[in-house]
Amino acid sequence: MHLFMTLVSSHSYFQLLSCPLSCPRLSPTWKVSEWALRAVASDRLRRLAQPRLHAAGWQPEPPQPNSLNRLTQTAATTTRICQLAQPKRRQLLEGCGPKTKAVTMTHRPCKASAHIELLATPKLHHPKFEGERSVCWSVSRAARNSVASERLLELSVPKERNALFEGYDPYVVTQAARSASPSPRIRRLCLPLPRKCCTNPDG
């Protein structure tokens, strides 16, 4: 019977997947097809349908005691058990976080040493400290009457460069770069490191 229900359920599941979303079933029960009724389970399916066995060390749960014996019912707690049943007295915590320190009930006020008070004194500003500059300030007469030189005017003009579609080629190497010769320092820096050079034993 268990095998038959497995076959029927699997076939019904595939029918549910093949059914379009526009025609959902109106009832949880439906007619089993003739193909599902005549299906024969394979050996693999028969092995999978077998119930799973318990593990080697599995033991059933022990039965719960229905009634307590007379000694348990008439037992009386000792003074030690009553003492252990009392809740612990926890110390009060000041503040929160991992850096909290326990404060006992008999907390005594303490006085800081002279060195601690010296370190707690705020630092003074430097004698030449002027503070932040105001947003608005007066412009000097020399700055207002200054005249830019021809060199300064030449440097302030932006460079005229044609766009890419106008024929500008950013990869053109200048004549000065073509005729440049490296210095002895650059030649030494271009040499590979001796520890990374592998010598060929054949050559």
Image: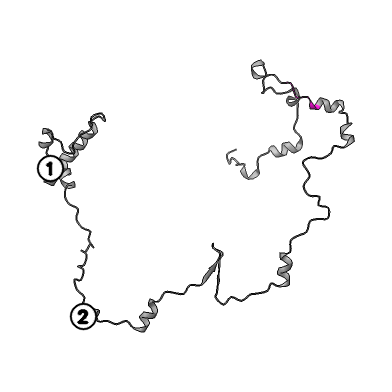
Q: Which residue is mark 2?
A: 70
Is residue 90 left or right of 2 when viewed as pictured? right
The residue lying toward the viewer, choosing from 153 and 196, is: 153
* Residue occupying the point 40% across, 76% down: 86
Q: Which residue is mark 1?
A: 4
* Residue occupying the point 78% across, 43% down: 134
Image height of 23 relative to 45, above or below: above
Q: Which residues are magenta?
A: 155-160
Image height of 82 relative to 172, above or below: below
| Numbered disc 2: secondary structure | helix
Task: Locate the C terminus by quadrant.
Answer: top right
Which badge, 1 or 2, is on the more N-terminal residue?
1
Residue 25 x %, y %: 20, 34
Q: Is residue 159 magenta?
A: yes
| Residue type marked 2 | Arg
- Colour mode? one colour
| Numbered disc 1: secondary structure | helix
The residue lying toward the viewer, choosing from 119 and 109, is: 109
Is residue 43 left or right of 157 when viewed as pictured? left
Q: Residues within 10 Å of mark 2 (few under 14, many from 20)?
A: few
* Residue occupying the point 72% across, 68% down: 117
Which secondary structure type mostly characterizes the magenta part of the structure? loop
Q: Are marks 1 and 2 in contact (CB under 8 Å)?
A: no
* Residue occupying the point 10% across, 33% down: 34
Residue 52 x %, y %: 19, 53
Q: CA distance from mark 1 to mark 2?
A: 54 Å
Q: Nearer the viewer, mark 1 or mark 2?
A: 2
Q: Residue furthest top?
A: 166
Q: How many marks?
A: 2
The residue lying toward the viewer, choosing from 57 and 112, is: 112
Residue 183 lies in quadrant: top right
Residue 67 x %, y %: 19, 73
